Amino acid sequence: MSQLELRSIRKTYPGVAEETLKGIDIDIASGEFLILVGPSGCGKSTLMNTIAGLESITDGAIVLNGEDISGMEPKDRDIAMVFQSYALYPTMSVRENIAFGLKIRGLPKHEIDQEVERVADLLQISQLLNKKPANLSGGQQQRVAMGRALARRPRIYLFDEPLSNLDAKLRVEMRTEIKKLHQRLKTTIVYVTHDQIEAMTLADRIAVLKDGELQQLGTPKEVYDRPENLFVAGFMGSPAMSFVPVTVEQGDNGLQAEVRGNDGRAIKLPVPEFLADRVGREVILGIRPEHITQPQDQKNDQTLVAKGEFTIEVTEPTGPDVIALIQLNDTNVHCRIDPEHPVEWGEIAELMFDMKKVVFFDPETEKRIAPH
Amino acid sequence: MTDVVRTGFRPSRVAIYGVLLLAALVYLIPLFIMLVTSFKTPMDIRTGNLMALPTDWTTIGWTKAWSEACTGVECNGISGYFWNSFKMTVPAVLISTLLGAFNGYVLSKWKFRGSDLFFGMLLFGCFVPFQVVLLPMAATLGQLGLANTTTGLVLVHVIYGVAFTTLFFRNYYVAIPDALIKAARLDGAGFFTIFFRILLPMSTPIFMVSLIWQFTQIWNDFLFGVVFASGDSQPITVALNNLVNTSTGVKEYNVDMAAAMIAALPTLVVYIVAGKYFIRGLTAGSVKG
């Protein structure tokens, strides 16, 4: 049970003009599963390395359970890490791999044996203990790497893109296992990934990073439903949120905004009242695929729902849904349609817009326009 | 129409194997001549054909070369010098290889400011001709009190060898993922623990490369041996030269050939024993982490 505070962490590499980390502030509660997510080069791996002590910080403080560990050597921090490449010691057996850290810390032999057995049971790798890493499959190597981290019972676990080297099916399996493990052990975990689905499914909270700056820190639901800015909105979710420039107008039944398809058909979408001070100005409508569907009868009488006909340009059946592409105000927009409601490309289909969960962004600042 | 894969003779195949066979013969003929000559009697050598097998097989050339032949004033054969070479080569090879491994570890996994420049400059050591360092090295050995000793020769060979061994190990370790080092650091391992417990056990192939290379270089060296050693501490290459050049009466080609074979044997043995690792080490790509 360990609580970790990152206090305005800054990192500049020697000879590089731009800062890699530009003041990151994150409090990680004991037992929390925090995911650092962002595109390549956003600084998430650097941040993780600084927590581990593999890289120094230029400014700020890393505080673990009230103790400043910023200047400590990695071995004194009592932090374990699982690497993307697993980084198993190739000349050692699985047992020796797991026991290595314990041996170095001078534990008596019977305690080491006990601990190795415990971890092997936990991860179901008991039958692999005498094998060399080269003779294991990717998934098995992944388990051993996690076992090595678990064996030391460290204060914090760091995961650096641990599932990236696995094939798609195994990745989903291991994702579930990691979540189970966390629910069982209630350990504090910091987990780096560039895969937003991993972030959504695993995290208690997600920290979205870009260019060394924290864009948003919140629960997966917060980050998904109320993204702080265009970057976060575009990064989380697949297919991504579509961004349509619209102008807010005063209509007969409240505020509205016009969207025009590429065939010239236009409809007025109802927009929420908090945009009242932006009448006549342009805003960016952020709309997720699930907000545009086939007409659903039960939604007919709801407020903030509109229907319109648009030309379907492309359809991509995914199984549970069909993702259809339409054009609104000259931008591509994805819609999520029930496969039982067939649409074909080139057809004109009636679509229902549910505006209750859409978000709006200021085109200047790219920040979300918050309801008052 | 079906294409039948032809497995029989084809002119191009025949040509390739013919050329290979010819090349092998060209390289083997001198060895063959040396070998048969070493087993001939002096009489046989003078009257017979160079390529012919001995009429009377005799090992007299070998025993004489080993224990009786004259190398200058003394006539005790080359056996003493053979052991001299071992006393020089074994420590020099081991020390230079270990130093190279250690250098390579630091230069690839614990880079410091200017470490790449340092490595670049160290590589110059591979290209410095032996002759250039003869005088300064002689002066240095003299000041250290190591002139004309086997220890002095070991020192010279270690210094010369470190450039090569560092190159071998550095390039081998560069291919080993850094994550391995990071994992070990988080496991609590320090600088030396990581080297001895993680990296060295992974280094067998490149160790073999370094051993073979250094053994061959140091065992076969003549120049340093003739300059920095004298009398009792001379290595076998120098003794062989003295033996062949000592002219008292008739030239005993069988003894010369036997002595040359004896001088060449250890490198041959090392290559045969460790050769498979040599190829493996040279072609080793990255190590799966």
Image (tube, coloured by chain):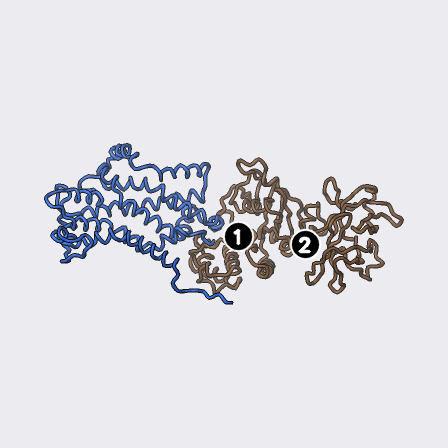
Chain colours: A brown, B blue
Viewer-proximal residue among A6 and B64: B64
For marks 1 and 2, give the CA distance. 26 Å
Viewer-proximal residue among A220 and A362: A362
- Residue A339 appears in which quarter of the rendering? bottom right
Q: Quadrant of the C terminus of chain A?
A: top right
The crowding category of the residue bearing disc 2, from other C-alpha atoms within 10 Å (few below 14, some 14 to 19, many at least 20), is few
- Residue A248 appears in which quarter of the rendering? top right
Foreground mark, 1 or 2?
2
In the image, B63: left or right of A368?
A: left
Residue in the image at 24% along x and 35% along y: B145
Identify the mark at residue A238; answer none if there is no mark: 2
- Which residue has dot 1 on it? A83
Q: Chain of mark 2?
A: A
The residue type indicated by label 1 comes to Phe
Q: Chain of mark 1?
A: A
Q: Position of residue A124 (x, y in %)?
A: 52, 64
Mark 1 falls on what kind of element? loop
Q: Is residue A111 visible?
A: no
Identify the mark at residue A354; answer none if there is no mark: none
Q: Position of residue B118 (x, y in %)?
A: 41, 37
